Image: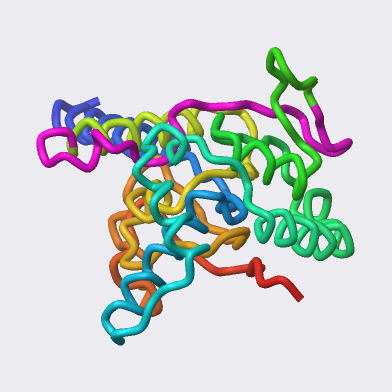
């Protein structure tokens, strides 16, 4: 065999090796289908709405109701806002949406294998009511839908904290979101229901709006940003790691 032939064979071998490596790297791209659920209306949400109502009344030179004023003043108790429970309206939302999901056999129909929820009370109550899933703790036993493999409670999913609103803490907040994304990508399950919070989801997806209470959305998460990101004219600001965002249910009380 001539030197020229040997050179051609060597080049061909290098080319095939490079192609194999490229295909191998492509096969390592992980895609997860996420079902994002914002918790039902909380007492903190209700108090915030009361505060808006008070300001609206004052702008219109009318006296706000004593009920709205009392509820708005409770916002100054910061600790109770961070982990507030579901409100009465929120309980009604859970019953209404749970009935919808049960009629359509949502968990089984979407082949949800893993459920992850925030440890905050409003998220736990929503997850339990909507999905019949709850991670166990010292107060409650684990509850798991018959078709779900695992239920996990993750502190990475808590709502944006008061300190994370400070400009010098924004990067640590973004880092927590990245840690959450890497966590869910590392799980073996491909279809995951996530019960969390509006500001967290808004930042994670890079949206210009918040999910409503008890709203259910579907989205795909990739471990790598595709070279040609899928255009989404309905949600132009959507983070490039995510695609196919769509709303499945709202939390309106019928």
Q: Residue at x 26, y 31 (%)?
A: 14
90 lies left or right of 168: right
Q: Residue at x 74, y 54 (%)?
A: 110
The answer to which of 72 and 162 lies nearer the viewer is 72
Where's the C terminus, which quadrant?
bottom right
In the picture provided, is 106 more to the left or to the right than 200? right
Which is nearer the eye, 178 or 4? 178
Residue 146 shown left or right of residue 16 in the figure:
right
Q: Say which quadrant the N terminus sits in.
A: top left
Residue at 88% x, 36% y: name it.
146
Residue 100, x across and y down, in percent: 81, 65
Left or right of 162? Residue 44 is right
Q: Position of residue 169 (x, y in %)?
A: 17, 33
Q: Residue furthest bottom?
A: 60
- 145 is within the stretch colored magenta: yes
In this picture the colour scheme is rainbow
Residues in magenta? 143-169
State the residue lying farthest toward the top. 138
Percent across and percent down for residue 60 are 30, 86
Residue 18, compared with residue 74, is above or below; it is above
**Residue 251 within the segment the image draws in magenta:** no
State the image quarter where residue 22 is shown. Answer: top left
Up-down relation of residue 243 to residue 13 (above or below): below
* Number of numbered labels in the structure image: 0
Viewer can see residue 122: yes
Q: Would you say residue 36 is visible in this rendering?
A: no
Q: Residue furthest left?
A: 168
Q: Position of residue 151 (x, y in %)?
A: 70, 29
């Amino acid at each position: 065999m001539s030197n020229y032939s040997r050179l051609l064979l060597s080049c061909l071998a290098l080319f095939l090796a490079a192609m194999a490596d490229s295909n191998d790297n492509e096969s390592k791209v992980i895609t997860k289908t996420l079902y994002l659920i914002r918790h039902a209306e909380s007492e903190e949400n209700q108090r915030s709405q009361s505060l808006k109502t008070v300001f609206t009344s004052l702008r219109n030179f009318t006296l706000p109701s004593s009920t709205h004023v009392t509820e708005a003043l409770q916002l100054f108790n910061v600790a109770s806002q961070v982990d507030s429970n579901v409100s009465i309206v929120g309980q009604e939302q859970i019953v209404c949406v749970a009935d919808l999901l049960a009629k359509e056999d949502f968990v089984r129909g979407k082949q949800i294998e893993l459920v992850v929820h925030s440890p905050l009370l409003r998220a736990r109550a929503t997850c339990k009511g909507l999905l019949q899933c709850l991670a166990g703790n010292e107060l409650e036993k684990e509850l798991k839908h018959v078709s779900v493999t695992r239920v996990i409670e993750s502190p990475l999913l808590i709502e944006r904290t008061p300190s994370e609103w400070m400009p010098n803490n924004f990067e640590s907040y973004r880092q927590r979101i990245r840690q959450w994304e890497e966590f869910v990508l590392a799980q073996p399950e491909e279809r995951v229901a996530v019960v969390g919070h509006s500001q967290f989801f808004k930042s994670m997806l890079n949206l210009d709006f918040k999910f409503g209470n008890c709203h259910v959305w579907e989205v795909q998460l990739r471990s790598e940003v595709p070279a040609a990101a899928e255009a989404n004219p309905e949600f132009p600001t959507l983070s490039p790691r995510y695609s196919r965002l769509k709303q499945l249910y709202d939390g309106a009380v019928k």
